[in-house]
Amino acid sequence: MKARSFIHWSRRTLLLAAFVAACCLQSKAADELPHVRILFLGNSYTAFNLLPGMVGELMLSSQMLAPHIGSSLQGNYTLERHTTNAEGMDLLKKGADDGKPWDVVVVQEHSVVSAAAAVDADAKMLMENGLAKLVKSAHELNPKVLVVVFQVWARHEKLWKEKSADALATGENPGQALARIHLANANAVKAAQEKNPGAQIIVSPVGDFWWLVHDLYPALSLYAEDGTHPDLLGSLLSAYIILGSIGGREMLEQSSWLPPDCPAVQAARAKKMVLDHPEVFKAAGK
């Protein structure tokens, strides 16, 4: 499957719940469902294959919530850079298309920083300060906001064989890179909670599930050809995990939407992996 990428990374996307409902052909009207407002702040890992829209489609197909989705996705951005990006911060302050504040803010750190922060003091400070600032801004606007930290995945093992500089910057091999990513995310969340008492912050263990699926079902294609970004199935798997982090198991079970170009058998296997391993969610952020 070929990944759908973007030429221009700057994205401000608002999907009206009614529009998504029409696309999904749901039997229950969107205005009959409780509404939830979700903002994504990330880079190309989130932008590939329109991941925010995938989460919205899956959420609405569950017929449990009607999503309002917003995003500011900037190529190669760190969380720290998002805090100084006028477009994204204005969108955070403005709120959703209905004028109400965001209920959920999903944030994604740069893939190299996500691993380096476990062993490098400067990267650790960069990641922890960036997350703490975004949590502070979101929490001030809505004290009940849920901040979801999108834990990225380790690069494909072929990049270590090719001696890719970015891959080597994350660890000696994919296993070490993932362990560092897991630790750095847990440390960043702990630091952000200490600086923002009362804030709700969770880690969505996308990278941990990628490792599990890639290990148990190596034939499933999760990576794009570059070995870094997600293929269509990789983005769908990520959307399943983020959906589960936000809405819980029942919402994931009830979701039925599929991307037109994604084989249903592969999607079902990826979804089943997420449902069959709740322990991965329990271990997130620890």
Image (cartoon, helix red, strand yellow):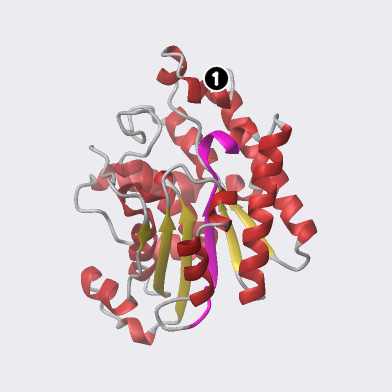
Does residue 190 appear left or right of residue 112 in this picture?
right
| Position in image of residue 273 (x %, y %) | 45, 44
Q: Which residues are magenta?
A: 100-114
- When asked about the image quadrant of residue 45, the answer is top left
Which residue lies under the disc numbered 1? 173
Across and down, in percent, residue 73 comes to 42, 54
Up-down: is 183 above or below 242?
A: above
Q: Is residue 278 in sight in this rendering?
A: no
Magenta run includes residue 225:
no
- Residue 20 percent coordinates (x, y): 28, 71
Q: Position of residue 255 (x, y in %)?
A: 37, 63
> Given the image, on which type of amino acid does mark 1 rest?
Asn
> Does 241 sit above or below residue 93?
above
Instruction: Identify the residue shown where x is 45% and y is 63%.
Output: 87
Q: Nearer the viewer, residue 251 or 230?
A: 230
Tell me the quadrant of the picture where the C terminus can be found.
top right
Quadrant of the frame with the N terminus = top left
Corner quadrant of residue 159: top left
Considering depth in this image, is 140 or 159 the residue closer to the camera?
Answer: 140
Answer few, some or many: residues within 10 Å of disc 1's Cα (few below 14, many 20 plus, some between 14 and 19).
some
Using the rendered image of the protein, determine whether residue 47 is visible from the camera's viewpoint: yes
Q: How many marks?
A: 1
Does residue 101 show up magenta in the picture? yes
Q: Residue at x 66, y 59 (%)?
A: 133
Q: Residue at x 47, y 60 (%)?
A: 40
- Please, is residue 195 above or below residue 238 in the view? below
